[in-house]
Every structure is written in C-alpha cells, then in structure tokens.
Amino acid sequence: MIPEKPAPRAPIYEKYAAGLAASKALPKSGEGPSERLRLLRGLCSKYLKGWPERMTLYTKSLPPGCVPCLDGRGSNLVVTGQCNRSCFFCFNPRPREDGMAVHGRAIKDPEEAPALIEKLGLKSVGLSGGEPLMFPDRTVMILRALRRRFGKSLHVDLYTNGDYLTEPLLAVLREEGLDGLRIDLAANGLSVAPVRMALKFFGDVSVEMPVAPIPAREERMRSLIQELDGAGTPHLILHELFFCAQNQEELAKHKFRAKSGEDGSKLMWGPVEGSEEMILSLLLFAHEKAQRLSVYYCSCKTQGWIAEKALARDSS
C-alpha cells in the first residue's frame, strides 16, 4: 500500500474541474477577429468534420476518449499535483501539491476512485497530474482499481509528458488494461521519441498540447504533423494557449494578449490571441497532407460547452 499523502484542497480542484468561474485577464487586444481568422474559420467549416458553431473541428476521426467527453461524461483523475517540469503555460494549481482527486473531488486512496466515478456517471477518465508517472506504482494501483470495478466499459487514458516512459512500464500499463496515452510534447522541444516508444505497445496514442502563437512555431508544428503521420500516430489534439490565474503572469511576460470579446467567458480560463488562427491553419495543412493522422481542435468554446453539459448532468 502506498503511504498516505495529504489530499489536495478540494475547493481549488472542484473549481478547476468544473471550469465555470470568473478569472482575471491578460491585457486584451481590443480588436475583433482578423480577416485571416474569419477566412480560416470559413474554410475549416467547409472542409473539416465537427461542429463549427463551437469550434469543435477535426480532420478524420475523434480520439476514442474524447467521444464520451463531448457528451459531458468524461473527466480527469489527478494522480498527483506534482510535476517534474515547469512549463510557463501550465494551468495547474500552485504550489504543486501531492494528492489525488476525481473530477475535482479529493480522495486519499486509489480504492475510493471507482465509486466516485460510478456516482458521476463517467464513461471516460484521464489519469493526469501534474505528471502521474512520477508515481508509477500509484498510477498502476488506480488503473487496477478501475478495471476491477468497470472492466473495459470505462475508457482510461494516461496523460504524460513522456519523460518517465520506458518500455517495461509501457508493457505493465498495457497488461493492466490502459486504453491509450495522451503525450504532451510541448515541454521536450517537440521530440516524437516518447510517441514512437508508446506506439510499440498501444494503438491509441495521441499527442495533446497547446499551440503558442509564435510565428516560427507554425512551421515547426507542420513538421511535427508530418513526423507524427509518418510514425503512424492516430491523433494530434490541439488546444488554444490559454490564460488563467495560475499562468497569466508568465504569459504576460511573454507578451501574449487575451483574445478580445469571444470564447471562454464562462471558464476559469480564456484563449490567447492568435492561437486559434494558427491551429486552424494547421488543421487545413493536416487535411491536405496527413495520410493517417487526424488532427482535432478542442477549443475554449468546446471546453466551455463540455463543462456546461457536465454541470447540467451533475445537478440533475
């Protein structure tokens, strides 16, 4: 049995999970959507799949774990708040405390998770953090507890930056019934090495990351799309870079500004100006160039819609 750790402060995690609260904002541009953004939105609405009215767009298919989430029946299970990285855009509560939580509800033992997930009616859960693989034994214990209760009826993904992935650990996770991995490459310079390793053990491997609107970044992201496609990666999930109380000071240092007048107004977070524009350009590039890789844009509008559906379900 793992040593008991202090549980995270529930009110912080409850707000974080639900996502509906006021937040301070970065300086806003004061401008509406650019002509290029309007054009990109029109092209994506015409050629891509999804729901353009809420900017939920994808090129080929949705990741399996995202399907229940879009129905308001997905959430995260925080394995730990601790992380080995210090990404400037990170939105997790600080200080980085160790502790577990399901959909924002603090728990002290992995065995508490299944009953809470069942009560909430969840069909998809992401084991997240922090970096969950800082505590691999705990991660495996949680996964075992979920499989004992739900079998394969619950979709379980693991969110990781990939730093702690090894082939022996991937073999254990596969044996214990993990469905897939979500790997954020933003912290490692966009190296696809952990993705290639994970694909040896799992068919469902997604890269999931925010897109910072830096001009040189778009060309590097196009190269990443081609690398992932060549490696046989099924999905790339892109989010707008967004500000919140936890990261707004760092984003301001990098001269980012909040998108003015739209998106995310009901969330604890809001999009950075220019991020969506770059993502839509990448979607069109992937639509034209990628043979297997499907790129999915989970916008702040999408996240707000999901949060409202989840809250409506919780209150019913």
Image (cartoon, helix red, strand yellow):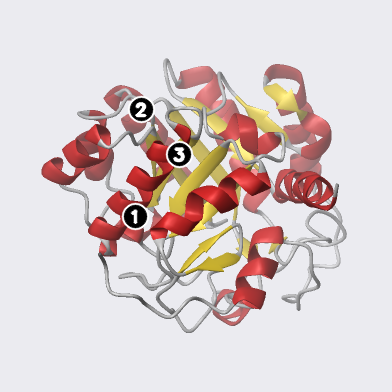
Judged by depth in the image, the label closer to the viewer, 2 or 3, is 3
Judged left or right of residue 74, residue 178 is: left
Q: Residue furthest left?
A: 168
Tell me the CA gap for discs 1 and 3: 28 Å
Q: Which mark is residue 161?
A: 1
Q: Amino acid at mark 2?
A: Thr
Q: Nearer the viewer, residue 278 or 74?
A: 74
Residue 145 location (% of width, % of height)? 38, 47
8 shown above or below 90: below
70 shown above or below 258: above
Disc with the residue nearer the chain's start (2 vs 3): 3
Q: Which mark is residue 233?
A: 2
Residue 291 lies in quadrant: top left
The residue pinned by badge 3 equals 149
Q: Nearer the viewer, residue 287 or 301?
A: 301
Circle 3 sits in a helix, a strand or a loop, which is it? helix
Q: Amino acid at mark 1?
A: Asn
Residue 288 location (% of width, % of height)? 53, 18
